[in-house]
Image (tube, rainbow, N blue to C red):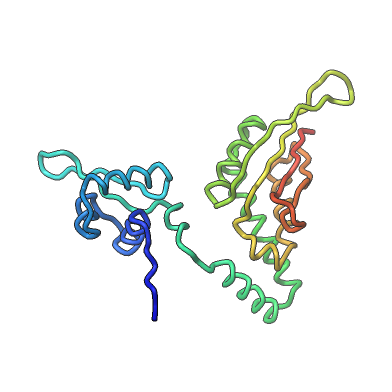
Amino acid sequence: MTVSQHISTKEEILQYLLKQGQATAQELAEALTISPQATRRHLKDLETAELIEYKSVQVGMGRPQHYYSLSHQGKEHFPHRYGEFTVSFLDTLIETVGEEQVGVIFRKQWERKAEEYRDRLGNRSLKERIDTLVKIRQEEGYMAELHPVIAENERGNNKKEEYIFAEHNCAISDVAESFPTVCDHELEMFEAILPDCTVERTHWINDGEHRCGYLVRSR
């Protein structure tokens, strides 16, 4: 005997949008047999949670229609096994071309990533560059934060800029667990895109800590 699991209306809306791509509030209400008013309340909650987004389309002379779809975060809400596939793929790659060659590939990937980051960071102040780095990492799925630290220069009253750059989750945790060398390349990448700074790892999820942390200090 099987017992069907009840899912919430919000979850039903997310699943419907996943399957259909987009829908209006009226279409959702009809498909899920709930009132338009209740549908709009659920949509508002999902929008606040940044799981859905909408675009307005003008239809005739009336009010614009809102077409709802999943946001990037909404798509990530559904289970996936990308990390497992990636680790399996890398294992196969090592068997095929050897561990040394895979190490070269990792380095090339981070060098390419560093070039992309440098283009986006530009030549602005250190604070502006690190703020931009935090936003980029958040876009890539890392729960990144920045915490300023004030340190006094050994030579006198000059103040050096110092920041703790923290990531409370890892978007490539499966890969990092199986291939920890990718974290070394990541550290090298941060050093490469902030050449006027020293970058030191202070916390590491792979060591059982709750976050990865880096101390960024102006030279």
Looking at the rendering, which quadrant does residue 153 occupy? Answer: top right
* Left or right of 64 on screen, residue 87: right
Q: Residue at x 33, y 43 (%)?
A: 44
Residue at the spot 52% in from the left edge and 48% down from the top edge:
139
The residue sitting at 74% across, 63% down in the picture is 180
The quadrant of the image that shows the C terminus is top right
| Residue found farthest to the front | 1
Question: Is residue 82 toward the left or the right of residue 191 in the image?
Answer: left
Q: Position of residue 63 (x, y in %)?
A: 16, 38
In the displayed structure, 172 sits above or below 56; it is: below
The location of residue 39, given as percent across then percent down, is: 26, 49
- Specify the quadrant that holds the N terminus: bottom left
Residue at far left of view: 61
Q: Residue furthest top?
A: 157
Q: Nearer the viewer, residue 7 or 111?
A: 7
Q: Nearer the viewer, residue 112 or 40?
A: 40
| Residue extending furthest toward the right | 155
Q: Nearer the viewer, residue 177 or 109?
A: 177
Residue 208, placed above or below residue 161: below
Q: How many marks?
A: 0
> Based on the displayed image, in which of its 4 quarters is residue 101 positioned?
bottom right
Q: Give the image location of residue 25, x and y in percent.
A: 24, 49
**Which residue is drawn at the image coordinates 58% and 38% (left, top)?**
132
Residue 52 horizontal/vertical position (percent): 37, 49
Q: Answer with the quarter of the image where residue 4 lies.
A: bottom left
Q: From what the image shows, is residue 21 above or below residue 101?
A: above
